[in-house]
Amino acid sequence: MAKKYRIKVDRDLCIGAASCVALAAKTFQLDSENKAIVLSEDADTVEAIRLAAESCPTKAIILEDAETGKQEYP
Amino acid sequence: MKSVDFLIVGGGVTGTTAAQTIRGLRPDSSVVILSDEPYELYSRILLTSYIRGEATQEQVFLKRNEWYQENRIDLVKGVSAQKLDANAHTVECANGDVYQYKKLLLALGARPIKLNVPGSELGNISYMWTIEDAEEVINALKGTNESRRPGGPLTRRGVVIGGGFIGLEFAHAFKVKGIETTILDGSEYYWGNRLDKQSSQVIQNILEKNGISVIAGEMVEKFVGSRENPQNVGKVITKSGKEFGCDLVGVGVGIKSDLGWLEGSGIKIDQGIVTNEYLETNLGDVYAAGDCANYYDVIVEGQHLVGTWANAATQAVAVGKTMTGVKTVFEAVCAYTARFFESTCSFVGMTEADFADEVVTRGTVAEGKISRIFLKNYPSTSSGSMTRIVGAIIANNFGEVAPITDAIKNKVDVSQNRDKLADANFDLHSLPIS
Ligand SMILES: Cc1cc2nc3c(=O)[nH]c(=O)nc-3n(C[C@H](O)[C@H](O)[C@H](O)COP(=O)(O)OP(=O)(O)OC[C@H]3O[C@@H](n4cnc5c(N)ncnc54)[C@H](O)[C@@H]3O)c2cc1C
Ligand code: SF4
């Protein structure tokens, strides 16, 4: 099976810089409080999701392996 | 001379994200980042949290040494690029090393403009751009604490020079640290170089409500050392002769890319490095992205210089693709939101006043929130001309950032709703997204 992430956003850390939204628009969206929310866990490629998470300036995006539950980022 | 496939000058978010993108697309190529900073990638955005004591140094760092190794990205730290020879495809460094590239990315970012007045070299006068700057502010905060003499004034005093984003960050951090804070701005009114008078007043009111004094129309003439510690700043004297006693100073008077070393290379420069929509410069195999790029913005149809994290990261991905042969247009609307005392000020899209044809103001000082929407007329083919929103400056009216961003991105024709835009009760979410 293709790799899949379970994606979480730490709302306390998120500042709404929105690079995640710009890099993986099918996965992330800003809500009315300007915090990122997860729309889908498999609409963008894993590479795009990974890059979006790694580009977050506050390390607010947490990626876990959907199968094993192991945290992969940060 | 070292030969590399992809050479990147600048190891900020732009250079690092581009390297990562290139590595993903070209697993076997050589990728080198030259950085004049001695560090792996860190988050400039978190520097203020670090100063306020809300983030650790470990949190501020976004990449570790192992990451570069795993991704086979050669980060050459503490090395400054000094000369570009586009014909020979070479970059020469200050330490004499020469790199020959197949493709070159300039991801030089920007640097704070330094105040050059008598006394600028005194201690406890800080800037806010690098991790060293942040350490300096932290030390200044600590130092002023420790050097407090018995019988001296109880509260420490800080002066912030410059309205604007960095000035706001300084003021917020000083205040959180219990420092009596005054902002001096050289313009006629607070943040007058970017804001209109009403939006300025909205922000100033918030600052004053939080105990910060804001004084406009005062330019720094000189800094004078303190009586107890003459090597440290003790006083700011302005051109009008006013004196502000202080224990520390934060300076935020603008940023500028350091492009002097590119002179003579033939590269086109206009404030930033000029690129097209693919982030290609006028020189073959040379690209620019991030804070240093004055790129062609396909959405507003004009050259655009942006200094935001999301813009930097997104351009980096686009340019990384283009450099590996997957030509990619950069297309995004970027926003920058400063947060201070539970309030916000956002810049969205193109906010250069001379680019717009008209500016519409929503909200009032009394309401404590104002959005200024920048409109531009575009000739369109069949249906006559259309009017589009190209940008906005949004003072403490955060809910409007998203609909305005959408309207810019979707090139919505607002000519039918033009008059309603000025009505703060008109819901911007109801603009038709065609
Ligand atoms: C305190 C602070 C708060 C901020 N807050 C926000 C925010 O809330 N939201 C937001 O969107 N943005 C924010 N920003 C702006 C954001 O950090 C920048 O837009 C982003 O870092 C730009 O990335 P960059 O890689 O293009 O440039 P930079 O991060 O400036 O990186 C460029 C690198 O290149 C190096 N370099 C330059 N010339 C040479 C040379 N000749 N040789 C070798 N190396 C060279 C520089 O030293 C630097 O390390 C903030 C910035 C600061 C300082
Ligand atoms: S990039 Fe990070 S801080 Fe920015 S919106 Fe996404 S999660 Fe939030």
Image: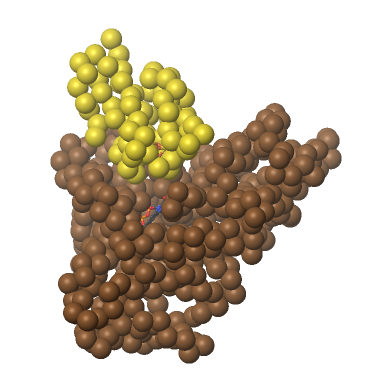
Chain colours: A yellow, B brown
- Report x, y in % for residue B163: 49, 66
Please say if B248 is above or below A19: below
- Residue B268 visible in rendering: no
On-image quarter of the N terminus of chain B: bottom left
Q: Is residue B396 left or right of residue B27?
A: right
Please say if B110 is above or below B434: below
Specify the farthest residue to the top.
A1
- Residue B223 visible in rendering: yes
The residue nearer to you, when weighing B271 against A24, is A24
- Report x, y in % for residue B76: 21, 54
How many numbered circles does the render carry? 0
The residue nearer to you, when weighing B210 against B387, is B210
- Report x, y in % for residue A73: 25, 31
Q: Is residue A12 left or right of residue B219?
A: left
* Residue at 46 percent of width and 46 percent of height: B311
Image quarter for ligand 1: bottom left
* Residue at 72 percent of width and 38 percent of height: B426
Please say if B223 is above or below B148: below
* Residue at 30 percent of width and 14 percent of height: A2
Please say if B379 is above or below B246: above
On-image quarter of the C terminus of chain B: top right
Q: Is residue B368 left or right of residue B278?
A: right
- Report x, y in % for residue B92: 28, 63
* Residue at 25 percent of width and 78 percent of height: B123
Specify the farthest residue to the front.
B151
Q: Quarter of the image holding residue B250?
A: bottom left
